[in-house]
Image (cartoon, grey):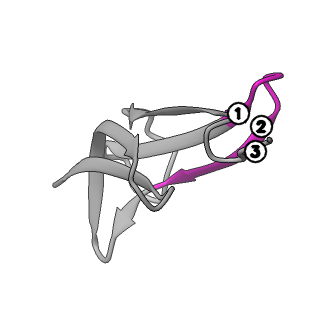
Amino acid sequence: MHDPVNDLIIVAGNSTSEDFAPAANNHAFAYALDMDGNWIWGKFFYNVSFAVSTISGCQIDNDNNLVLLGLGD
């Protein structure tokens, strides 16, 4: 059976690029690839007016939700 959540490669971390997001500070990001390396989705994270500066962990919870552990500025 095909499980769309568990059949993805999830990559997360932080970018220090000055042109990655609306401001020139660190921004967390996460993206997903399928098992063939095709881009599925991607996002940088912003919390109201403060950037989420890094994502240091992720897992799938018991309800099949992706849970990301991040640190805000």
- Please tell me which residue lies in front, 5 or 34: 5
Tell me the magenta residue range: 33-44
Residue 8: x and y, percent?
Answer: 66, 35
Q: In which quadrant is the N terminus drawn?
A: top right
Residue 15: x and y, percent?
Answer: 41, 34
Real-space Cα separation, disc 1 to disc 2, in angstroms: 5 Å
Look at the picture and state if 50 lies above or below 36: below
Mark 3 and mark 2 in contact? Answer it, CB < 8 Å: yes
Q: List the residue tagged with mark 3.
A: 40
In this rendering, would 31 be left or right of 12?
Answer: right
Q: Seen from this angle, which residue lies furthest bottom?
A: 48
Q: Considering only order in the chain, which callout, 2 or 1, is on the residue closer to the N terminus?
A: 1
Mark 1 and mark 2 in contact? Answer it, CB < 8 Å: yes
Residue 39: numbered disc: 2
Look at the picture and state if 19 lies above or below 16: below
Mark 1 and mark 3 in contact? Answer it, CB < 8 Å: yes
Q: What residue lies at 38% left-to-right and 41% top-to-bottom? A: 59
The 10 Å Cα crowd at callout 1, few under 14, some 14 to 19, many 20 or more, is some
Real-space Cα separation, disc 3 to disc 2, in angstroms: 4 Å
Please identify the quarter of the rendering in which residue 14 is found: top left
Residue 17: x and y, percent?
Answer: 44, 33
- Please tell me which residue lies in front, 70 or 49: 70
Amino acid of disc 3: Ile
